[in-house]
Image: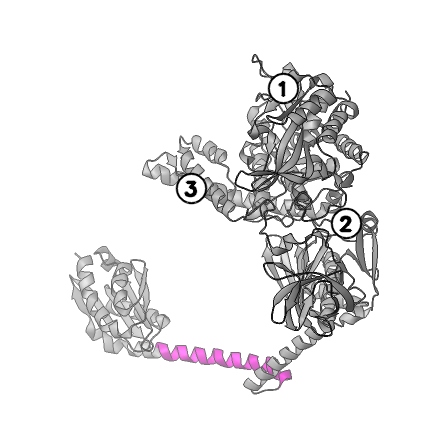
Amino acid sequence: MKAYGLNELREMYLKFFESKGHLRLNSFSLVPHNDKSLLLINAGMTPLKPYFTGQEIPPRNRVTTCQKCMRTGDIENVGKTARHLTFFEMLGNFSFGDYFKHEAIAWSWEFLTEVVGLEADRLYPSIYLEDDEAFDIWNKEIGISKEKIFRLGKEDNFWEHGAGPCGPCSEIYYDRGEKYGCGKEGCTVGCDCDRYMEVWNNVFTQFENDGKGNYTELVQKNIDTGMGLERLAVVVQDVESVYDIDTFKALRNKVCEIAGVTYLVDPKTDISIRVITDHIRSVTFMTSDGIIPSNEGRGYVLRRLLRRAARHGRLLGVEDKFLAKLVNTVIETSKSAYPELEEKKDYIIKLITTEEDNFYKTIDQGLAILMQMQEELAKSGKKTLSGEDAFKLYDTYGFPLDLTMEILEEKGMNVDEDGFKKAMNIQRETARKARSTSNYMGADVTIYQSLDASLTSKFIGYDNLEYTSTITALTTEDEIVTELTAGQMGTIFVEETPFYATSGGQVADAGVIKTDSAEFVVEDTIKLQGGKIGHVGVVVYGSLKSGEKVTLSVDEAKRLATGKNHSATHLLQKALRTVLGNHVEQAGSFVTEERLRFDFTHFQALTAEELEVVEDLVNQQISAGLEVATQVMNIEEAKKSGAMALFGEKYADDVRVVSMGDFSKELCGGTHVKNTASITAFKIISETGVAAGVRRIEALTANGVFNYYKELENELHAASKAAKTEPALLSKRIEALLEEIKSLNSENEKLKNKLASGALKDVTNQISEVNGVKVLATKVPDVDMNGLRTLGDQLKDKIGEGVIVLASSQGSDKVSLLAMATDEAMKKGAHAGNLIKEIAALVGGGGGGRPNMAQAGGKNAAGIDAAIEKVSEVLSSQIK
């Protein structure tokens, strides 16, 4: 048997099933589309669910893929074992109502034995306990002896996921030989050791589970085959684990080179090497699909993996940032199958480097907090850190439990592990509840799922704003109907429509659908599964019936204004990449007739100068009157031509390329102007951050710009009128007013100080004694806190040693209190902070401070006298 490389095996598999009439599809993004049940794609069949359920018609009844997958339920075990991975590739061949068990079993055997060259006598099939049909195929058609076919129970060999399609499985195990076994007598298929490795799983979806344990035979039976590419490589290359196959080994060796360590010398070191090797693959692929680090959802998964890898670098003694160097190795070993890795290389490296840098700042903060926790434990005589504190370090600062335990162990301390697990489970339960898992598709069922899957709509709106077509279906909010009447809300489907449905960030068209006797106002246009376009609105008068001819008219003004803003986003993206760099990628957009919003990847706020250059560059392209050309071409040709594609977007074989002169070229299905001159003008009105590494620009075009400046002009005139000057002189008038205010404030402060000084003559005769300490507690009229402090300092000089308490009100609802104690008074027990706390309550406020000086505010001037009277009582308890 030849030891094929991982990349070779992937291509061999896909070509084999292409030879069996399968359509090869590129891997879908790791980000699920229309599936709320998952954060990330976790199996090869997951993106194909609509084809299995019949909600969409597949491009062919036979499909083969190699799908990027992520499973994160056992992150803590990754590295500790040689089995666990977070990111992996799943090979699959699928049949949607075409072939079934006979072909699936025969082809799996043919590929493994004849194409790959695995020895037939080392392969062992398993079947579901009750699946006699599969048993007979293996035994009578393939020729496997009965004793080599294993019948396994429902837990092992029956695939189901809640309500929906399900069915028995037939797996194929490969005997890797005694050197990988446990050595126990009777070791065979099903043993937990590494000798018998499952390399293939045929899933025969032949039943429908109603969610209550009732199974009915499916009319359309399907095949869902899953085979882990990495597992197959382990078998073919006859290596110990996935970390020893060719692509992993290249990455693993790079980790060792950077860290200056050797694999398989120290078990602890090996864990860190495996963690980094696995996690850097995951974060590279996640980032290439547009996932950005955050504190929730899939962004949290990315951040956690990245930080875990960075921390294990520290454990290996790597002090500097190193993950970007490993990204290069991931890309080199995977770009033949995933060219988007090379295309997004600059961005991937920039994002991962930034996040790694942020983590090193965070981990240092976490270490400082852990040190504080250690000190508090030592002071209290305790030796166990609470689970809540350990989880805080883990969740906020990226400290896995083992790191916290390791650091504490050095100090003779430990962690409440049960408390940590409890806190972890609470978080997991919260995350689980945040995701809807209503059914097999993970999305709420609507009436639209009941429409015929063969029903489709063709968009012909690029060249038409009015068109005559035939109604193919009508629905209300909860049922399919044959007629909609006056006053009814509903959705109309037609064969061909000029209405653009919301997609690609562009809002939907509005307009009307008419017959000679009826009118339906279209309020929204929606894109649905299977290429359906729904026109949502209300019947104004008359009635509309299925099969009827109708005229569809798009609101032209809205469409044209929206097109101007959409075309401007293309110019903006190119301008941003020109000014800031090629790491800039679109991270979302929202285009309406009023304005445009564009989210993009960048790691710091734009300066005023950068914004000005970007805005000028866009306006230059508008003034240049660039022709906007659209062309439909093959996706590969489009990419080779330099057309920009969106992160994680799944494109058809043929795509629409929108070019604006030689300046901008993007894949886009939206509507645009015919010449950039139509945009007229472009104005950025805001630039903000919306997430880590994501910025947002909001901008206006055409009439939006003119209206914006008109509003500014109106505000300018209003401000000038209020300032009693002309608009051209407004800035000078404001400067003069500010100078005048400054002068008046200075004069006001002098007057206040003079008044406060004058009050000294009136209050010094109010000095009393409490237990031998001089006390002056009095109120002074209309003095603010600054004035009270000045007065207090002057009174201290005047009375010598003692305690001073001053109160003043500015109106009935603002009170200021000040307390001061000299050194001798404090030695005898006086404490200004404690004194002010007790008397402040009487004026409806609170405050505090140091023993020598404290202040407070209040809202009840009527309580000042009571507060002054209470001073002697409080001091009597302080001064002994």
Q: Residue at x 56, y 12 (%)?
A: 185
Q: Residue at x 20, y 75 (%)?
A: 765
The quadrant in which the C terminus is found is bottom left
Q: Residue at x 56, y 30 (%)?
A: 154
Disc nearest the viewer among 3 and 2: 2
Q: Quadrant of residue 508?
A: bottom right
Q: Which residue is mark 3?
A: 389
Residue 392, how many percent across, how many down?
A: 45, 43
The quadrant in which the N terminus is found is top right
Residue 454, how many percent across, how many down?
A: 73, 51
Q: CA distance from mark 3 to mark 2?
A: 50 Å
SS state under label 2: loop
Q: Would residue 737 be counted in the magenta stretch?
A: yes
Q: Which stretch is magenta?
A: 726-753
SS state under label 1: loop
Q: CA distance from mark 3 to mark 1?
A: 42 Å
Q: Main secondary structure of the magenta part?
A: helix
Q: Which residue is mark 1?
A: 195
Q: Could you say which disc has been placed on residue 652 in the image?
A: 2
Q: CA distance from mark 2 to mark 1?
A: 42 Å
Q: Decide: marks 3, 2 in contact (CB < 8 A)?
A: no
Disc nearest the viewer among 2 and 1: 2
Disc nearest the viewer among 3 and 1: 1
